[in-house]
Each structure stands twice: as C-alpha cells, then as structure tokens.
Amino acid sequence: MSTDTHARSGVSGVDAFFRITERGSTLAREVRGGVVTFFTMAYIVVLNPIILSGVIDGSGTMIGGTTDLTKSKLLVAVGTAVIAGVMSILMGLVANFPIALAAGLGINGLITGMVLTHRAEKITFADLMGLVVIEGVIILVLVLTGFRKAVFKAIPAPLKVAISVGIGLFIAYIGVIDAGFARRPTTPGSVPSELGIGGSLDGWPTLVFVVGVFLIAMLLIRKVKGAILIGIVGATVLAMVLEAIFHIGGRVYDDKGALTNPSAWSLTVPKLPDSVTQTPDLGILGQFSLLGSFEKLGIVTAVMFVFSLLLADFFDTMGTVVAIGTEARLLDEDGNPPHTDRILVVDSVAAIAGGAGGVSSNTSYIESASGVEEGARTGLASVVTGVLFLLATFLAPLFAVVPSEAAAPALVIVGFLMMSQVTNIDWTEMEVALPAFLTIVLMPFTYNITVGIGAGFIAWVLVKIAKGHARQVHPLLWVVAGFFVVYFVKTPLESLFS
C-alpha cells in the first residue's frame, strides 16, 4: 500500500471516529480550533500557581509541601498542565465534544481563601483538595444516577439562551479586565471600575490588547481562516517587540499590596526565554487528604464548603456546555448537546482528578468557544488542546511567552459573537425577559457564572408563581431553586448551625 493510501485511510479513520465531515468540519479546522483554544486557556498554567502558591497553610508550608515559592509555583504549573491535558483528551475521545478542561477559576481562589481563613485550625491545601475529591465523587454519582442530566433537560429554552448570552458577556468582561483595559480604580471610594489607568488608556500592554481586538475583528470581517489564532500570534509578536525596545517588565506590588507600575504586563512578560524546555516535576500529584478537613474544620463547615463547590461545578459546566453547543450548532431542538451524559461524566471525573492532582477542581472552559469560532465541531479539537497542555509541561517557558494582553482579544471577540443570540429571547414577555435579564447581567456583575444561573432559576419560579402559572414549573426546577436559595445565604446558615 502506498504512503498516500495510508495517509488517506488514516484521515478517514480519524474523520469517522470524530464524525468530522458529518458535523460539517475539516481536519484542519479541528486542529486549528484546538490550537486556538489552548492559547486562550494557556494563561491558567501561569495564573493557577499565582492564586494557589505563596500562601502558607496550617502545616507551615505552601501548596506542594515546600517553603520555596519558585518550586511551589513550578509544581502547580506542571500539575495544572498535566491534569488539563489528560482531561481535555478524555473529553475529546469519550464525549467527542469541542470543549477543553482545566483548573476552575473561582474554585482555586475559594481554596486559598479557606486556607487563609482557617489556618489557625491547621488546615492544609491537601485537606481542602480532599474535599474537592469528595465533591467530584458526589457530582459523578449525580451524573450516573441521571439526576444531573435530568436537571440539564429541565432548564427552559429561554434560560438556556440567556445562560449562553450571559457567559458571552462574562468572558468579554474577563478579557477587558485581564488586559487592563478596564480595572479597579486606585482611588478608594470611587467607581467600581474605570477605563484603563485613571480613566485613560495608558501603557504599551493596553495598546497590544486594542491592536489584537481590531486585528481579529478585521480578519473575521474579511473571513480569513484562522483569524483568532492569527490575532493571538500577531499580538504576541507585537508584545515581544515592544518589550525588547522599552523593557516594560511585569507588574510590581509594594508590601501593602498596592500596584506600583500599573502600565506593566499583568501576568507574563513577553520575552524569549533562556531555554524553551524544562523537565517537569510531578511531585504535586496525589497530594490530598480525603477526610482531614472534617477533623480540623468540623462537619458543618466542611459540608458547606463541599456544597459551594458542588453548585459551582454543577451549574458552571451546564452553562458552559450550552454556550459551546450553541456556538457549534450541536444542540438538538430542545437545546441539549449530543452525548450529554458522557460530557457530564468526563467533567465529573475532572473534578476528582483536579483534587487528587493537588491543583483544584478541573472543569469545562468557556474559552473553548474561541476554538469553536475557528471551526471546531468535534472532540478532535479537545484532543489537540490536551496534547498541547501536555507539551506545555516540557515547553512551559515557550508557551509562557504569550501575555494575557495578547490572548484577551480572543475572549472579547468571542463574547461579542455569543451575545448575538440575545435576539432569540422574547423581551416583550415579562415571564421570560426578567429571569433572562438577571441571568445575563449577574454573571459579569458578580464575576460568577453560578450566581447568574441561580438568580435566573429563582426568578423563573417566582415569576411563574406571580403569574399564576406555578404548574408550568418543572418539578426539578423547584428543587434546584431551593438549593440556590441555600447557596446564596450559605454564610449566615453556616454561622447559625456552627
């Protein structure tokens, strides 16, 4: 058999397995989409160590069991990339859905906050990672019993649209904040956020972001293939040139936590590394204590923490899957994606793997929408993203060159594209419009997808009651709305029962 014949049969096998042609895609689009998704998600390899490392837990060490900040960050970075890579590949192979996974933002911050709050009780990162594992097991049980899928299907179609639109607005907000285009004012007591620095755009990193946004927009208008990837690479090259000329450097904070150079790069300084390879240290994997938190925090506090993780994982994923499925045009007439049960199983296993890997619960990433916008329609894109994450453990210095200011434009453009679905909501009908509105605006306002979904569910039930249409509410929505009421007042409840 000739080489060409082997190549054709290989591509045909991949095509058949992932149903690439059936879903209106091509091998090139899937690969390109996977690469774009990786570059819009790669920041987590840099950000997760920043959030989790540097805090001393109850054992007197940082996460990873070390007192060396550099080593702690390296351990978290490698662990983050490994778990993200394996779980993204698993999502592609098992669920054949174009969505990648990595350590969940918000959950990692919650873990660090718990360490700071309960350090006196000798709580450790390993103890809290044990609770993450328990939460993941509970989620998996809910999936295997059909409860999670049933809730997924019980969500009214208008709320599914609102969730997608809200996430679009949310990720656009993440983009402008990550790039420093909008930020918290330095003057106490002023507005919550403002344009740039002191109400004005300032600094070369902001210019990179603006150029990136308009470059991607122009390429999309001209229907150039690979527009988002070209935009990210182009903005990164510009950033590297500016850094080489002006030596901008990274942000620096004083001993009080105040930013001393706001016009610097936010996370990554875009310059060529001394070496493009490194030997990964997998020492953080397996650092968790399953029941340690119950002994140190008490049952009530530990259970409330698991409950918070549970709702965040349960509904963040639900919203993300709906949004990605909508963008990829993979939802059925009821707004459900193909192989919903497989998607949810992999996502649940990812929560367990993230805790067992010592790097926080892993979850589906809305940034996958950037790859979908590049044409990704199958799990092959997720496999590509996963492979790149695994390569990042060896090539972390090279991937770390991309600053958030160069990746953030992709989030803004994708957010704009997702917002276009807002026309599918009937804004003339209060029963639909009010819950949809709360779902959409509270995601960016609270910087939390779960809060937006919860407010939408509760509002849907209350409006139906007010209109005398309580019987139209799906039984599961009553249950879920009740859970969200508890979620919103969990702190006073915890204090009451403690």
Image (spheres, rainbow, N blue to C red):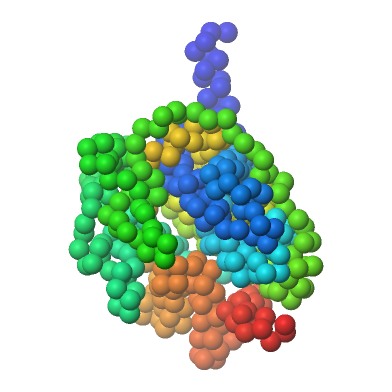
Q: Quadrant of residue 153?
A: bottom right
Image location of residue 215, percent across then percent down: 24, 45
Task: Using the image, determine if residue 462 lies above or below residue 134.
Answer: below
Image location of residue 417, percent across then percent down: 35, 56
Name the residue at 74% across, 76% down: 300
Q: Quadrant of residue 399?
A: top left
Q: Count every numbered label the image shows and give the total.
A: 0
**Relative to the observer, which residue lies in front, 182 or 381?**
182
Task: Using the image, determine if residue 496 lies above or below residue 54.
Answer: below
**Relative to the observer, which residue lies in front, 492 or 256?**
256
Image location of residue 20, percent across then percent down: 51, 36
Name the residue at 64% across, 77% down: 483
Q: Is residue 318 left or right of residue 170?
A: right
Residue at the extreme front of the image, as rendered: 255
| Quadrant of the drawing holding the C terminus | bottom right
Residue at the extreme top of the image, as rendered: 2
| Quadrant of the drawing holding the N terminus | top right
Residue 228 visible: no
**Relative to the observer, which residue lies in front, 106 or 350?**
106
Name the residue at 52% across, 17% down: 7
Name the residue at 67% across, 49% down: 65
Task: Using the image, determine if residue 341 lies above or below residue 189.
Answer: above
Q: Is residue 238 left or right of residue 257?
A: left
Residue 60 visible: yes
Image location of residue 448, percent across then percent down: 49, 67
**Relative to the observer, which residue lies in front, 228 or 236?**
236
